Amino acid sequence: MKEFNGKVMFLDRADINTDEIIPARYLTEITKEALKPYLLEDLILPGFNAQADVKKNNVVVTRANFGCGSSREHAPWALEVNDINIVIAESFARIFKQNMFNCGMMAVELSADALDRIFKKFANNETTVTTDMDKMTLRFATADEEEVFPFEISGFNRALVEADGWVGYADSKY
Amino acid sequence: MGKTIAEKIFDSHRVDNPFGDIHVINLDAVFCHEITTPVAINDLVARDMDRVFDPTKIKAVIDHVTPAKDSKTAMQGKIIRDWANRHNIKDFFDIGENGVCHALFPEKGFVRPGYTVIMGDSHTCTHGAFGAFAAGVGTTDLEVGILKGVCAFQYPESIKISVNGTLPQGVYAKDVILAIIGKLGVNGATNKVIEFTGNVIDAMSMESRMTLCNMAVEAGGTSGICAPDMVTVDYLWKFISDEFSSKEVALEKYLEFSADPDATYAQVIEIDAATLVPVTTFGYKPDQVRPVSEMSSEKVDQVYIGSCTNGRIEDLRIAAQILDGKRIKEGVRGVVSPASPAIYSQALEEGIIKIFMDAGFCVTNPTCGACLGMSNGVLAAGEVCASTTNRNFSGRMGKGGMVHLMSPASAAATALTGTITNSTLYRAGEK
């Protein structure tokens, strides 16, 4: 199973699409590793600097409909090769979400209220997330504060995370 | 309890129901192109699992960048070409026979009512126009599809969109779907199938139905679906005439995959066709939709007619009617890409290519290229393109470019004036 802990990159906008996560001009790459320098290159957000922010963080926290648009699995791969294995959002586009779990990564949904709280309380400070897969909780912590949020994922997606992806799971079953 | 089209297809294809609402279904077709398939192929090779579940059910094409533009795209082509050869995949389309997958595969008769189809391409939802469940997936789902012929989905709820009445002049399938996306929002149909119905859809050609279903994913939809009818049978007849004694018998069989009158929908939306107008997008999201008439001050640098949304013969005919005998505005670059060799050839025969060329358009070979900023019409930063494609995301057709999505009619009229223009200002035959 992959690691789902680390420092948080806050992306405070809904509908961040796959072209923003990894632009189509890099889809000519045929290895995941080659995508590493280009993650979120076309995302324009106040205060966001793709180069610096991607390097130091391992968790993405964002708003609704993250990963909409293209089916490109290059989007989760570009996260994965940058050691980002978990995205926490209000909701995801279907294909992106399945791609994450198919790669043994986590796309975790929290309520809009919970995310409002998280953004208000943590977004302005250096924050780490610790994921407890047994208790199904996310612990957000800064130097002075912490708060624990319960989460749910489907039994199927949990099985994919535990099997480190869909290829191994499907090959053993079908 | 009655069922939707998608529910009937799922219930006839289920192989497992491992968890809650997750259903593993078998696949009638797995489509592949050179952008998302090579990584799956390499992974299968690395796992020592370089097999395919059924070479006759796998269809492959090189379409996104063709002919190859550099060493990297040449290698992507080589990987899928070698793979198709070693697995005896007969339906592989390379240079000279290749075109945009969602235009090429339907015209080869690869999609039938009731089919389940996946592809590593979000616009796979296009094929729902044939009464099929067709969904875009990522490379891992594609890889398992290639290997095992199955895919897992959440059992799909459907949204029924009923369009009735008469479309006003200058309003086409593209305007209908943009209006619907504007209403639903970019995640209004997430995890759901959009079932299109109503007398406007009944009267549409297969080409127009494909335009509608193509953009279901822009509202987050898993697949678009139109119920099979005689229009579907007529389109498919040359491929299925051996299987059925008459078109009526074929239709009767396919009507198994129509929705029951008491089917349950997550949402039902009624649209009065008479209220629709030609529309275009104004921002970086496909749900940011506005009447063309309100965008008339927007200047464009390029007009692009093509893609899996609007690069079919019907689209080229409509644009050519408007362009016939006229020249595009000086300073505007016109690019047209017929979406398949058959469409290109038909357009040549009908004199459509000459009309485009006389008007000042560059005619490219069939390819996805410009739509996603990979080749054949990439924008420079600060440039604006009126485009018949499906995505206006920031950077989509080139970093720093702006894309306004619209119908082929509006795009052709815009090419003539250099600013976003309603096609009804250029009625067919008027010079």
Image (cartoon, coloured by chain):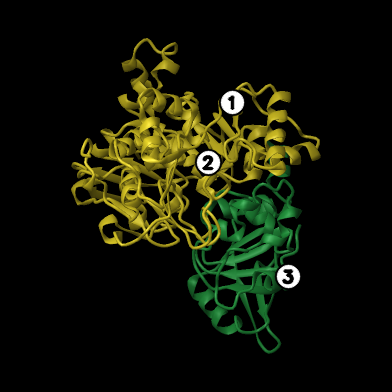
Chain colours: A green, B yellow
Q: Is mark 3 on a helix, strand or loop?
A: helix
Q: Disc 1 marks which residue?
A: B57
Crowd class of label 2 (few under 14; some 14 to 19; many from 20; radius 10 Å) = many
Three-letter amino acid code at the position of disc 3: Lys
- B426 or A114: which is nearer to us? B426
**In this rendering, which labeled residue sits more in front, label 2 or label 1?**
2
Crowd class of label 1 (few under 14; some 14 to 19; many from 20; radius 10 Å) = many
Q: How many marks?
A: 3
Q: Disc 2 marks which residue?
A: B368
Q: Are marks 1 and 3 on the same chain?
A: no
- B418 or B293: which is nearer to us? B418
Crowd class of label 3 (few under 14; some 14 to 19; many from 20; radius 10 Å) = some
Residue at image position (70%, 73%) is: A52
Q: Distance between the residues labelled 2 and 1?
A: 23 Å
The chain carrying label 2 is: B
In the image, is residue B247 above or below residue B152?
above
Q: Disc 3 marks which residue?
A: A55
Q: In which quarter of the image is the C terminus of chain A?
A: top right
Q: Quadrant of the N terminus of chain A?
A: bottom right
**Left or right: where A155 falls relative to A162:** left
Res A165 label: none
Dot 2 or dot 1: first in sequence order is: 1
Three-letter amino acid code at the position of disc 1: Lys
Three-letter amino acid code at the position of disc 2: Cys
In the image, is residue B114 above or below residue A46?
above
Q: In which quarter of the image is residue B35?
A: top right
**Left or right: where A18 falls relative to B242:** right
